Image (spheres, rainbow, N blue to C red):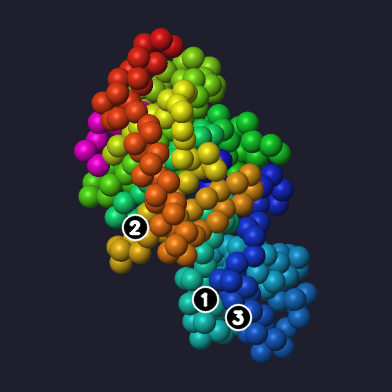
Amino acid sequence: MTGTASSGGSGEPETSDSLKAFGAVVQAFRKRAGLTQEQFAPLVGYSVPTVASIEQGRRFPPDAFVERAEDVLDAFGAIRGAAKHLSRQPGLASWFRRWAELEAKALSLYTYECRMVPGLLQTEAYALRLFTDQLPPLGDDQIDANMVKRLERQALLTGRPNTSYSFIIEEHVLLRQLGGLELTREQLDHLIEVAQLRNVEVQVMPLVGESHAGLNGPLRLLETPEHQRLAYSEGQENGHLIAEPKVVSMLQMRYARMRSQALPLKESLGLLRQMRGAT
């Protein structure tokens, strides 16, 4: 799902350091005030289980909770201050959030995808189809949050014209016709349009080839404003941010080889137009 939240349950984020720290601050001030969770909950207008989840770092606190807790506990601004450092972003899987923060500031972003059209290149209809096909099924609120975050991320392509974007997409991904012919035509039209932006390169990896440097799966690479190079890989329900220079260097080598194995830019654009005409 390329970094979107997929939980069909409570919708609570996985525990993070920032959530744990916030919960500890609330708990410390609650105990300082001599209140139990049972006494504190009605004062802030939330249930005891909700208060417990927030203090344990398992639930993202609503803005109203932050304000009420700050006032009820007379926390000297500490609770509001801790809330500013919370890292959850609704609509993004917990393992993807740090990468999303990095890609929003990156000088360059390279993406190889063999499963689906990369998130930054998906049409709204294509993305919606992915979210509605998710198993276990997502609720309407989660789908809406995913769509909002996906569209926000896509604004990077035009909003950061000085960032260099490279995409390598497997031809079979485009031949799958996910969602049917009309959706596929719309997606191909969008790829053709985006591929002509000055800061975007789109290459297609052909179906047939004697060698392939990307058989280990999807890959993303970026360069930060501080010129640090990082990588990211993603599986079914997990993602891994890679900072080890030797490993990143190896992955850069693989991506460079894939760029030479994929169709050149003009040929890739020509194939997209050919595929658009055939659908």
Mark 1 and mark 2: Cα distance apart in space: 30 Å
Label for residue 82? Answer: 1
**Magenta range:** 191-199
Label for residue 25? Answer: 3
Q: Amino acid at mark 2?
A: Glu
Q: Amino acid at mark 3?
A: Val
Q: Is residue 66 above or below residue 230?
A: below
Label for residue 260? Answer: none
Q: Does 194 lie within the magenta span?
A: yes
Foreground: disc 1 or disc 2: 2
Indicate the secondary structure of the residue bearing disc 1: helix
Residue identified by numbered label 2: 223
x, y percent for residue 188: 39, 23
x, y percent for residue 164: 28, 47
Q: Amino acid at mark 1?
A: Ala
Indicate the secondary structure of the residue bearing disc 3: helix
Of label 3 and label 1, which has the lower sequence position? 3
In this picture, residue 211 sits left or right of residue 71: left
